[in-house]
Image (cartoon, rainbow, N blue to C red):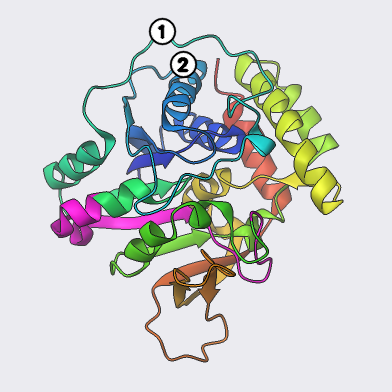
Amino acid sequence: MTRKIIIDTDPGQDDAVAILLALASPEDFDVLGIVAVAGNVSLPQNARNALKVVELSGRTEVPVYAGCERPMRRHLVTAEHVHGDTGLNGPGLPEPKIRLKKQHGVDFIVDTLLAHEPGTITLCTLGPLTNIAMALVKAPRIASRIKEIVMMGGAYFEVGNITPAAEFNIYVDPEAADVVMRSGIPIVMAPLDATHMILTTHDRLEKIDAIGNKAGKAVAQMLAFSERFDLQKYGTKGAPLHDPCVIAYLIKPELFEGRHINVTIETASELTMGMTVADYWGVTGRVKNVTFLRSGHAEGFYQLLVERLARLP
């Protein structure tokens, strides 16, 4: 059955791959809109990147909006050291011809949820959760209308990638993540624990490049650029591919394993700010609020990715 989704994103090479995977899968997704948020780079650049990726997909009918340009309470932390100064370094994607919609992304999220039947829209979040939290603050009644939130964010056994304790998306706006975790909305979290198993090895990148279309070439170039940082950092045979796990989970949930647990966000300690405290062993008695994906199957994931990217221009 086709699932109605809104993609909230800060593209980012891995965000771009996630967007392409969704737009290449019309039998799985009715993409109602894409909303940019500040994160990997600044909001204007992330919004421009989202437009470029939509154009690359050939799905130019999908509307793109700009949301919040900074976290709820903090100064923006960005990740040019990973993604390059544009956030999409690697391929030379042309300047987009399509334009952003004028409506603010948070208002688009609220209005769209209110206009559709309750329980019919899934939010796919690939960046900091600022836009989602602001929508929940502005219109709390939308919480009961959201089918579920499937997010890339957090970590527990792998701990942190931007600080020793925190994953980047949660660290950028921990207060927003806290609002979302306390919302009562069904949440699926694709944390570093799962994404660090989905490695872009040399062979896998070659298969993507060998698809031969524009999208495959661009993805291979993007990931070859962004992986250099992680290869040096982790010393693994490939770099983690984070955000596409959100889309892959919705297409083939059997690619991932996890359990329903409580996840709480640290917002007070500077030492562990943005840590996702995952009660994986059920020792606290706190209400279970998150399906936490602990592992993923890389071979099946890359088979799906190559198959879907091959459909694009």
Q: Judge left or right: residue 82 versus residue 284.
A: right
Q: Judge left or right: residue 221 versus residue 252.
A: right
Residue tagged 2: 55
Element assignment for label 1? loop
Q: Is residue 156 magenta?
A: yes
Q: Residue at x 23, y 55 (%)?
A: 136
Q: Nearer the viewer, residue 293 or 126?
A: 126
Instruction: Assign the C terminus to one quadrant of the image.
Output: top right
Can you say whether 121 is above or below 294 in the image?
above
Can you say whether 81 is above or below 250 in the image?
above
Q: Is residue 116 magenta?
A: no
- Of marks 2 and 1, which one's residue comes earlier in the chain? 2
Q: Nearer the viewer, residue 53 or 160?
A: 160
The label number, if any, that marks residue 97 in the structure image: 1
Q: Are marks 2 and 1 in contact (CB under 8 Å)?
A: yes
Horizontal and vertical percent position of residue 311: 56, 23
Start-end of magenta stretch: 135-162
Q: Nearer the viewer, residue 280 or 48?
A: 48
Q: CA distance from mark 2 to mark 1?
A: 8 Å
Q: Residue at x 37, y 56 (%)?
A: 149
Horizontal and vertical percent position of residue 10: 48, 37
Q: Residue at x 54, y 67 (%)?
A: 270
**Quarter holding residue 211:** top right
Element assignment for label 2? helix
Question: Which amino acid, mark 2?
Answer: Glu
Label 2: how many residues lie within 10 Å, few (<14), some (14-19) or many (20+)?
A: many
Q: Judge left or right: residue 140 versus residue 152.
A: left
Can you say whether 141 is above or below 216 in the image?
below
Question: Which amino acid, mark 1?
Answer: Lys
